Image: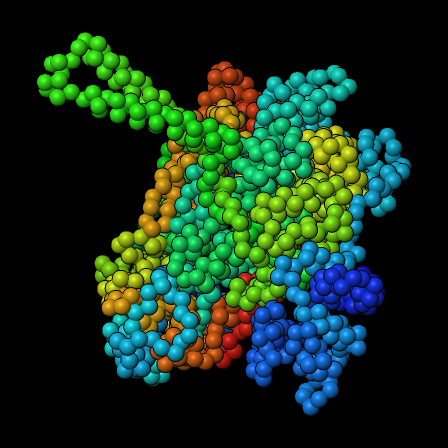
Amino acid sequence: MKSPYKIQRSRQIRSFAPRLSRRDFLWQAGGGLGGIALAWLLNGEAQAESARVVSIKSPYRPKPSDFSGKAKRVVHIFAAGGVSHIDTFDYKPELEKHHGQALTGKGKYDPFFGQPGNLMKSPWRFERRGKSGLWVSDLLPNLATCVDDITFIQSMVSRSNNHTPATFLANSGFTMNGYPSLGAWLSYGLGSENEDLPAFVVLPDSRGLPAGGAINWSAGFLPATHQGTAFRTNAKEPIADLNTPPDVRPAAREASMTLLAQMNQEFAERNPGDTGLAARIRSYELAARMQASVPEVISFDNESQATRRLYGLDSDASAGFGRNCLLARRLLERGVRFVQIFNGGAFGSPRINWDAHEDLVENHNKQAAVMDQPVAGLLKDLKARGMLDDTLVIWSTEFGRTPVTQGINGKGRDHHQLAFTCWLAGAGLRPGISYGASDEIGFNVGENPVTTYDFHATILHLLGLDHTKLTFYHNGIQRRLTDVHGQVVKEILA
Amino acid sequence: MLDKAPQFCSAIRRQVGTGLISAFLSFLSQSVLAVEFESFEKNIQPLLQERCVKCHGPEKQKGGLRLDSRAELLRGGDDGLVIASGKSSESPLISRVSGVGPDKVMPPKGDRLTIEQIDLLRKWIDLGVPWPEVAKTNDVQPTLSDHWAFQPPKLPPVPAVRNRRWARNPIDHFVLAQLEEKGLAAAPEADRRTLVRRLSLDLAGLPPTPEVVETFINDPRSDAYERLVDRLLASPHYGERSARYWLDLARFSESHGFEYDKPRDHAWRYRDYVIRSFNSDKTYPQFIREQLAGDVLEPITRDGIIASSFLVAGPWDEVANNQVGQLMKARARDEELEDVVSAVAQTFLGLTVNCARCHAHKFDPIPQADYYRFKSVFQGVRYGDRPILTPDELQSHSNQVTQLKQSIGALENQIAEMEPTEEILQAFTDSQSRQRASLLAELQSERGVLGKIPTIPLAYAGSRQQPEPTHRLVRGDVEREGELVSPGALSVVAKPSPEFGLAPDAPEADRRRRFAEWICNADHPLTARVMVNRIWQQHFGNGIVGTPSDFGVNGERPSHPELLDWLALQFIEQGWSVKQLHRLIVTSSTYRQSSIFNHKAAGIDADNRLLWHFAPRRLEGEAVRDAILIVSGRLNAEMSGASFRPFAIESFGSVFYKLTDRDEPEFNRRTIYRMNVNSGKDPLLDVFDCPDPSFKTPLRRVTTTPLQALSLMNNSFVQRQAKYFADRVNREAGESLSAQVNHAYLLAFGREPNPDESGRAALLAKGHGVQNVCWALLNASEFLYLK
């Protein structure tokens, strides 16, 4: 069994934000948080050195990859509800020709709500964009300006046309509850570059949690260290229990921490050989550092007005989601390995995700107004800062939507898992290309199908991990993110 | 599979797999009727399956031909008939396999069929192509394996040891013999103060009170330790502690999971059942039987019905079950059944039978058919609430309600008939008025009785339906049905027989009853071994087999194989009493070792697999929370009943559990009574590695993270309990700060502080209040560790 604490060689990478020096940190901790336990921290470190306690590294420390990957960190935008491929990135002129006609020649068809209507052309105009000339509809005017940096996969297929199993599949490789999510696997495989912050941070949509909530960022059977830490972006306290309670005086906390450090130190000395005890001592130091780091990362004080506008913070529709995109950049800059941003919440009414059953135009216009500017802003900002070279941007959705309406004369589209679009951008990719294709109406895959397993295998590859080797023993099986499937889509690699 | 002596075994397997030669010999000597079965079941079907169906079956239909059902076979292919029933000489199938005639010989790849095989096909066609739709039971050939776990346990001799004085019971002989072999010695016995804390945390999941500690330390009786063990095993807290481990295995969830994650309001009854079962020391086979088939075992009891909740304790996709698309629905159903099969096989057999869903198990001798035999056993299991009344109780409940309703109806009619108009009312005699009044009174009283009949209590035990016969699914694909299978068990187990003699359409209840009996058979090579290993793991942190739900080829080898067998046989011998097993283990010298570190031993055996000392380990999240509550004096020891819900339930399409932290006795019950919902996990428990409820967790991981530290530092629950702890100390120890510190140490650590510790803590108490000392104690490693 692979120990999560096995000491491994660490790897140096370029850091974009200056890491807090110890002095800066102590200053911030002292100034910003009312002097928590400075003495304790210094004391703890000195004691750890003198007491010959086994040196325990942070549970988030970086680990070596299988080979040199181009991407060092990932931001994953998950657009919940099922974004229509044929109304965004997958242009289908044949649908215009056959608009209003019945669907034929596609065999037995089993849409989610079982009421296939007639073919419906996209209500949005498509246009070739950028130097690459890739098609994007008018629904996403800002993302349309980014196509030269994007690598589209137009031939995605999912195993389920039911939101939650399809979402679990997209995020964890399995349709059932509770398998480790992609971010947990990456945390397990690579650790973090900044031990003051969790390796895997989740930013739920400010409108609400996705269906299944924390199940979506579970560590499953991996050690809990690798579970996604959801930032509560609307709350005063971004991480549960981060802040020292207001009724605890700083001096009292400092004195208590000192006593605790002594207790734990002595107990560890009485019980040598147990690395868990040394890890506990270390965890309190990391906790104190996290108390200083998190407020710094969530503060936008140093962000310019131009940057805020770039992320759509000046518009009511996109401000909430835009803040998460900006926060994601700040987290990535500070060495967080994997940031997952949810675009869309659960399936209640009114709709707060892309699940356009009733009225495609109304729904997708509304969701695009939330997503388009911030995601485009994130791409541009990462590029401008030189981060796109070694940051992987993933944009995915659980499935696409039907080329036919839901119900005869319906205005919406139903779930469609047989062909849809996802895209990647950044490190290690061939930008401005489109891989794979759906058929003439976007119903089936026309060429080069890409399964979720292939998609995940490719992501791991970009990070320098072999998807067949990133394993964890659980109940009889060396489990993988890609189960027993998956092939790296080599054609999209730079 | 078959990693040892592979050639010999696979040679046997090949023979057994086709069984042709021996079957052919017996074929000649048997009656025609017997031949019908023998030839098809044993010879023809495997032959078709092995040599023909790959190209002419569900996956491919070359030449438009399928040979996997009689109807398809007789229908023929694109070129017409392939069989003339009763006339082998006129059947193209025979000429094709014989290679006579111009057409390509079949099968085109591999060896040609032998003369014997062709002869069998001829006779089969001449007999009229008998193809029993309901396959006979012996349709699965035994699978052979020399893997240790499939061999029956043998009673090993208790090994001799040099240090005989140290060994208290045979466990110690087995352990010490291995230590001595490596030139190691056992650690000295821990002191009584350590032992009482260890036992109490281990058996009850709670730290001992200072009184218990002092009483034990000062108990002069020679059997003081055994008495303490017995007292703890008799404590109701023992059941709460043991049940937590079991609920981890049972993936006990109090919500559905998936998109809606709706609460399961009645699932808690299973939790209470498990606690009751451990507390009453129910025999292990009875415990198994009830969970697999309690709802159909005569006499049917409430506990039996509740126990069968085990089957449906896993996640359930409500959206998929309600959707219109049949294919996706079928796939979701197939996932449900995999969850049931894997829970059963992993929990009771320590095997990952579910790995054989799409293909033969990659490591273990489990053919794909075995998975489908298991599936057939549980295929009638459906999800949902159900009444827990026994059939008799339900009948009498229904009789009572019917009677009352009838009587109320009759009274209402009578009264209605008397309903007076204005004139008649005046004409009412006194007696009529009195009669009417008395009827009204009677009506009211009957209605009252009806209103007081309690509603029928429910449990999340699911319903059962007679299922369709089960087919093997080619590559696990619901759209690709293979051959029919009968309910059965693991073909690698020779004794008890895995063949139930049941037809594919056997009654649902029979399947589960037979299956439960198969697992509970004392000859079963896995049942007792798997359970004794789990109990061992509870006490030492690691099992003798380090992969407690995988005794297969890919699992870990036992560190002490003879000890495992000895314990398994002892367990059976002692009437499958789990409490006796605990007692045996914790009264051993092995268990009583101190946790003292030994560099030499650590150099040889860093993981302490040889048990050269008692390895300290961190408490589970539940035990941490419970320990905090008992130390603060706020633990509400109320057992059983509906779970406490420390959250507000909000609904937005999906259900969201918005956590609240309320300071009320209801919320200070032991953590096992917290509603165990999928998406409403408590951050404090979460950071202490409490698993996702819907995941089968045979072994908790222990991680140490900054988030864990933050939780203990700042969590409002911990803050509050630290205050109560301080209040208690103040109340019980009086004014003196050093007395308060002393008492706080006793409560939290079960010991007094040394002068240094006392001085430091008193200084903190003086400067900032004793509450800060209490907070530090609750955060301390010593508080969180069992050693």
Displayed quadrant of residue A323 = bottom left
Is B298 left or right of B445, judged from the image as shown?
right
Displayed quadrant of residue B76 = bottom right
Is B364 left or right of A175, judged from the image as shown?
right
The residue located at (30%, 62%) in the rendering is: A357
Residue lying farthest to the left in this orientation:
B423
Residue lying farthest to the top in this orientation:
B430
User: Could you tell me residue B47's position as x and y percent?
Assistant: 71, 70
Judge by depth and name the residue closer to the eye, A125 or B592.
Answer: A125
User: How many labels were placed on the picture?
Assistant: 0
Judge by depth and name the residue closer to the eye, B343 or A206.
Answer: B343
Displayed quadrant of residue B717 = top left
Judge by depth and name the residue closer to the eye, B540 or B397.
Answer: B397
Res A464 visible? no
User: Could you tell me residue B709's position as x and y percent?
Assistant: 50, 42
Judge by depth and name the residue closer to the eye, A240 or B726.
Answer: A240
The residue located at (65%, 65%) in the rendering is: B131
The residue located at (74%, 29%) in the rendering is: B587
